Amino acid sequence: GIDQIYIQTKRYADGDNIGAGDIAISLAIESEESTKGIFITTSDYTSSAIQTGKYLGTRIVLLNGNELAKLMLSYNIDSRDEPVLHLKKIDEESFENQS
């Protein structure tokens, strides 16, 4: 009862997007060697890659750089807390109540 899951990752620069041809994991899923796959990139996907993902339906999950960063922050993976910067603002109402 355990599914085989293929994972493919690409570390690309911002703007160097993953195309449909880059998603080799889809071939393994289509040939029924696996039932599910996850493709993770630090960049993003072209529209043709997104269409390939939609064609494969729930059998493949495409995670781009923004989604990866959100997951990393949510689960504290390779992240750390930074000191909070407090911003001060003048309370203008205090000047209006003076006579």
Image (tube, helix red, strand yellow):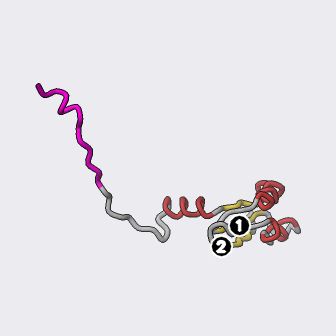
User: Is residue 38 found left or right of 57 in the rendered image?
Assistant: left
**Which is nearer the eye, 41 or 75?**
41
User: Is residue 3 found left or right of 91 in the rendered image?
Assistant: right
The structure residue drawn at horizontal position 70% and vertical position 71%, both measured from the top left corner, is 7
Dot 2 amino acid type: Tyr
The structure residue drawn at horizontal position 18% and vertical position 33%, both measured from the top left corner, is 94
x and y, in percent, of residue 77 in the image: 49, 68
- Crowding around mark 2 (Cα neighbors within 10 Å: few <14, some 14 to 19, many 20+) is some
Q: Which residue is mark 2?
A: 12
**Which is nearer the eye, 29 or 91?**
91
Tell me the chief SS of the magenta region.
loop
Contact, mark 1 vs mark 2 (Cβ under 8 Å) = yes
Quadrant position of residue 95: top left
Quick one: SS at disc 1?
loop
x and y, in percent, of residue 65 in the image: 61, 64
**Which is nearer the eye, 23 or 7?**
23
Dot 1 amino acid type: Asn
| Residue 17: mark in rendering | 1
Quick one: SS at disc 2?
loop
The structure residue drawn at horizontal position 46% and vertical position 65%, both measured from the top left corner, is 76
Q: Residue furthest front?
A: 99
x and y, in percent, of residue 28 in the image: 83, 71
Does the stretch in magenta take in 83?
no
Residue 87's place in the image compared with 37, above or below, is above
